[in-house]
Image (tube, rainbow, N blue to C red):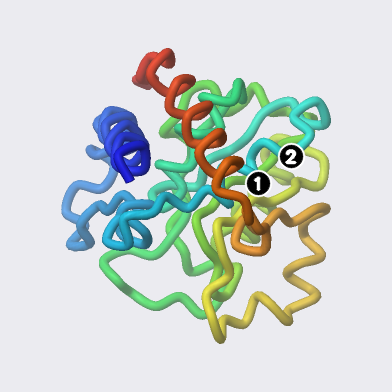
Amino acid sequence: MKQDNELFDEIDRKTRGLWSSFRRFYSGDSKPFYNKIDRDYKSSGRFPVQVLKAIKGIPRENYDSAVCILRGALPYSTLFEAEGWKVHYLICGRKNGETASNPEELRFNKSVDRTLPEISGKKVLLIDNNCFTGNSPVRTALELEDSYGIKRPDLFLDYLVPNGTFRGDKEKQGQFGNIYIASEIDVKKEEERQRLMKEFLEKLKLEKIKIN
């Protein structure tokens, strides 16, 4: 339990440091910022180590970098960076809780990170926290393919929202190569659980907070 709490706290510290770089782009947005890992798991007292195992299981050598879809994926990007990934950032999502029935209705901003053009022509992994309709990662994939000519991206998700439409939408799923879903991974042994947390905690403490 102590190590769980330490990992929650370290990720939150890094997440809030990163959030300071992007807060101004959400000026006037009525939706508060949440660390989605804290929101979904902290009350249980157990860190979602399946996320750590999923990240470690992705063959980093197959990718040039990753792209974090703000805001929800921000805490996950700290874990990817701790694992040695180069992460770029952009905004894609709803504003002020408004509904969006298709990807084109979402706000999109690729100018929040000046390093983003480095992905031109590259193979990248998109990072999002969860998926209900799939509109945000699909919009992101299409925009990046159009603007930077990236190869068909892969997608990392913590989980699919229950009863969401993305799960059965083959057309939207087809916008991606591999889709890695952390919630579908088991960590059965407590020894492995403790080892994963210790490893990432040590790496996070060594990483400097990235400020754009």
Residue occupied by mark 2? 58
The residue at 33%/74% (across/down) is 98
Please state if 74 lies on the left or on the right of 20 as rendered.
Answer: right
Dot 2 and dot 1 residues touching (CB under 8 Å): yes
Disc 2 packing (10 Å; few <14; some 14–19; many ≥20): some
Circle 2: residue type: Ile
Disc 1 packing (10 Å; few <14; some 14–19; many ≥20): some
When the figure is inspected, residue 191 is found, relative to residue 178, above or below; the finding is above
| Residue 161 placement (x, y as % from top left) | 52, 74
When the figure is inspected, residue 208 is found, relative to residue 114, above or below; the finding is above
The residue at 67%/28% (across/down) is 65
If the image is split into quadrants, where does the C terminus sit?
Answer: top left
Residue occupied by mark 1? 54
Q: For the residue labelled by badge 1, is the local secondary structure a helix, a strand or a loop?
A: helix
Task: Pick whichever, 131 or 88, lies toward us.
Answer: 131
The residue at 42%/50% (across/down) is 47
Q: Residue furthest bottom?
A: 163
